Image (cartoon, grey):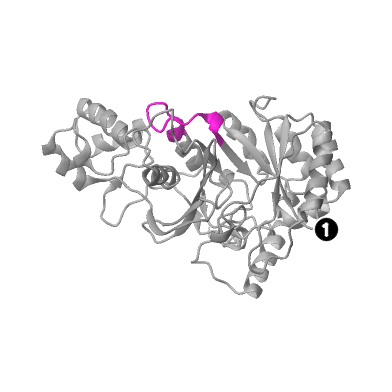
Amino acid sequence: MLTAPAALMPIPGHIDPVPVARAPFVRPDGRVDLIGLSKDQLRIALADAGLDARQAKLRGKQIWHWLYNRGATAFAQMTDISKTQHPWLAERFAIGRPEVVEAQVSTDGTRKWLLRSPDGQDYEAVFIPDADRGTLCVSSQVGCTLNCRFCHTGTMRLVRNLTAGEIVGQVMLARDALGEWPSQPEGRMLTNIVMMGMGEPLYNFDNVRDALKLVMDGDGLALSKRRITLSTSGVVPMMARAGEEIGVNLAVSLHAVTKEVRDEIVPLNRKYGIEELLQACADYPGANNARRITFEYVMLRDKNDSDEDARELVRLIRHYDLPAKVNLIPFNPWPGAPYECSTPERIRAFSNIIFQSGISAPTRTPRGRDIDAACGQLKTAAEKKSRAELDRQAEAKMAALA
């Protein structure tokens, strides 16, 4: 019996993600890219290519070490593998890195890379150096569906999720640029990772999880889970799973304390309200005073920055008994943005109210503004739309949420 075709969902991403089996990405040259594969997946790929089980296990272990511990970009660099086998491997497998379309360096030392995938999609990564740490801001999607109104990335359409290889590839590319191979626990410039680049990580859960497991593997990139923070706009059903299966620090893009304001600036609030979100934070596995949840709060002039807003934020944190700190983020402007940044005096007053309640509330120093690398500014040059078109797109997304 014929049935009517299901209606197409006009705006992707506004349903909770469900794991769906997908065919592995095939490069135009037919080779399998090894970056992003786990140890078992790499062994299976070698066996599928024709190695017997014993050889696949041995070679898989050797190649995995060269890829993730030593940063090899060619099989010829793998000195403990027979030279006669290098051509066989190179014919069947690739060691990918994102293509760097443009690399920019800010006056404050921040680095931004515009990257391109084999299928021609652009995304960005940012490295922020500090005196005692270096933080890599990693993207999880090409574009974004959430349309947070203060965020330039939110004006982009979602093109697709990044693969686990493309996510971990950003970390490896940064290691290349910083000259930090082989992996070692001390003396690194790249000490921290934040999943705060383009996209909503919890709408690409499986790939983000698999990539971060590679990053945290002690035999490879070896970055502690305490040095990794995953940021979400509030995809409530996936938060507990993130704590259980990934176990990294959690940051929540809160940005408002009332339904009316958060509905406007973080439209996902229309689906998962503040109370539901904060209860999910209270239930987050592993959250305690040593591993506090970070609430990100962008300071928007005359929108969310009053003394009353600060007091309500304190009340909510206390009501849900949350081990929390608040990062106050001065709004970073971009062309056509509908908001202005709060004044320095207003930010200080807001911060003081929270500090006086016993909750840490530092103000984040904007970094990389001159190269559009600051928080909320990431947006690839491939996305150039008129303001009217962006407004129409925003209205369509908000209507879909409603």
Q: Going 72% across and 65% down the picture, which residue do you hit?
A: 338
Q: In this view, does 372 lie to the left or right of 64?
A: right
Q: Residue furthest left?
A: 84
Q: Going 62% across and 55% down the picture, which residue do you hit?
A: 376
> Which of the 4 image quadrants contains residue 80?
top left
Q: Is residue 14 left or right of residue 278?
A: left
Q: Where is residue 255 in the image (x, y as percent from the top left)?
A: 74, 49
- The answer to whether 311 is drawn above or below residue 117 in the figure is above
Q: How crowded is mark 1: few (under 14 residues within 10 Å), some or many (20 or more)?
A: few
Q: Where is residue 399 in the image (x, y as percent from the top left)?
A: 71, 62
Tell me if residue 278 can be seen.
Answer: yes
- The answer to whether 33 is drawn above or below residue 217 in the figure is below
Q: Going 42% across and 45% down the picture, which residue do you hit?
A: 174
* Nearest to the observer: residue 72 or residue 274: 72
* Nearest to the observer: residue 3 or residue 388: 388
Indicate the amino acid at tag 1.
Asp
Q: Going 72% across and 35% down the picture, which residue do you hit?
A: 325
> Which of the 4 image quadrants contains residue 55?
top left
* Nearest to the observer: residue 270 or residue 316: 316
Which corner quadrant holds the C terminus? bottom right
- The residue beneath circle 1 is 302
* Nearest to the observer: residue 337 or residue 356: 356
Q: In this view, does 342 lie to the left or right of 364?
A: right
Q: In this view, does 330 lie to the left or right of 68?
A: right
